[in-house]
Amino acid sequence: MAQEKSDKETTTAAAPATRRQLNSRLENYRNKSPAERLAQLKEAASLSADDVAALGQPGALPVERANGMIENVIGTFELPIGVATNFQVNGRDYLIPMVVEEPSVVAAASYMARLAREGGGFRTSSTRPIMRAQVQVLRVRDPYGARLSLLAARDDIIALANSRDKVLIGLGGGCQDIEVHVFPSSARGPMVVLHLLVDVRDAMGANTVNTMAESVAPLVENLTGGEVRLRILSNLADLRIARAQVRIPEAALATKDFSGQRIIDGILDAYEFAAIDPYRAATHNKGIMNGIDPVVVATGNDWRAIEAGAHAYAVKNGRYTSLSTWEVDGAGQLVGTLELPLAVGLVGGATKTHPAAQAALRVLDVGSAQELAEVIAAVGLAQNMAALRALATEGIQRGHMALHARNIAIVAGAEGDEIDQVARELAEAHDVRTDRAKEILARIRG
């Protein structure tokens, strides 16, 4: 697997004067009604009336528009959209739109972001937005000779690929280089695979690289004497890496029940388990994706591609392991790091067709796809820290079930103020069951 070079890495700078300035510490946000939260968000993020409608009203995606996005449309399906608060990334505050159905995700991310602020927030960096397109060549008699023929024609291949997207070239992107991978023996005979390495700028890039791969196929056949089959991107975007780091002082982690050192030790124990055991690593990484996927969905990006790339990257050294690392620095601070491929875009696809996705991007107010990827990585790291902290202390169920109690109250038939009453009793009794919720509801109504 190719490794990114340090000279390709960038760090998102603090906000220039022309960018919106906000404070992501929205006080008492969780205790307000949805309408009050939306009004506060409108003020904090300087949203337009159209943005407010897209985020807060049902039917933001008209069926007519949905019908143009996929096939056989019969309607639309809604999920809750929430806002994670307190995030500070590279010295700049962000409000994070998250689309998710699971209780505790938004609350956990917001709380960990608040703790992170005491250590300076999250620091992030990323590599250039390089995507891979693969051109598979079969029926090659001399695969290693074919490899050298392709490498010798590098400039011609790049020029042909770039002839298909003048707009991307004008933006400073385009095919930058090639790689050639040889599989001398497979069940289908020798195989040569050409990789086009394409800087896709602020796009996710799938359509761009697929078009380039198809355009160079005839030249590849002429150069190799083989037959081209697949011409498609790879979702293992290992040259498009986003990284996040956080440092938490020991004192910031302390609670009334646990010292900061006890929590650090518990987090390190939990991380080490994920680092050595793939069964734990799978759930550990799912917790990271609990933070990443909701932001990807909210912004209209392809969460299946992100999931595929992340889990493939987790096994890059031949064994499935944790995407994050946790350790202690010389000052006794807890240090968390996360790096993974994040192929997200600001242009094309649902990011431009879905009104709520456009509004979510305006809430985030990011200036590039790289900046979006870095912020998303920070959210993933925050979510990971929240899960490890809970596992290392009272267990994952206590906080999760307290929030899940609202769902159970609704399932039991509670409405309005009844929902909070029933949920509170369920949580206090640590007995979150539908039948118990029905008993409490009957008593309240009786």
Image (cartoon, rainbow, N blue to C red):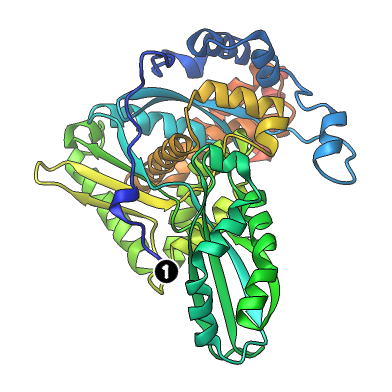
Check the image and name the residue furthest to the left.
330
Residue at which label 1 appears: 1
Residue at position x 31%, y 34% from top? 122
Q: Position of residue 308 (x, y in %)?
A: 56, 58
Q: Where is residue 208 in the image (x, y as percent from the top left)?
A: 64, 50
Front-most of 36 and 150? 150
What is the count of numbered marks? 1
Image quadrant in which the N terminus is located: bottom left
Image quadrant in which the C terminus is located: top right
In the picture, measured across the screen, residue 234 lies left or right of residue 384, that is: right
Seen in the picture, residue 161 relative to 118 is either above or below; the reply is: below
Front-most of 114 and 15? 15
In the picture, measured across the screen, residue 200 lies left or right of residue 351, that is: left
Seen in the picture, residue 400 relative to 417 is either above or below; the reply is: below
Q: In the figure, residue 322 lies in which quadrant?
A: bottom left
Front-most of 57 and 192? 192
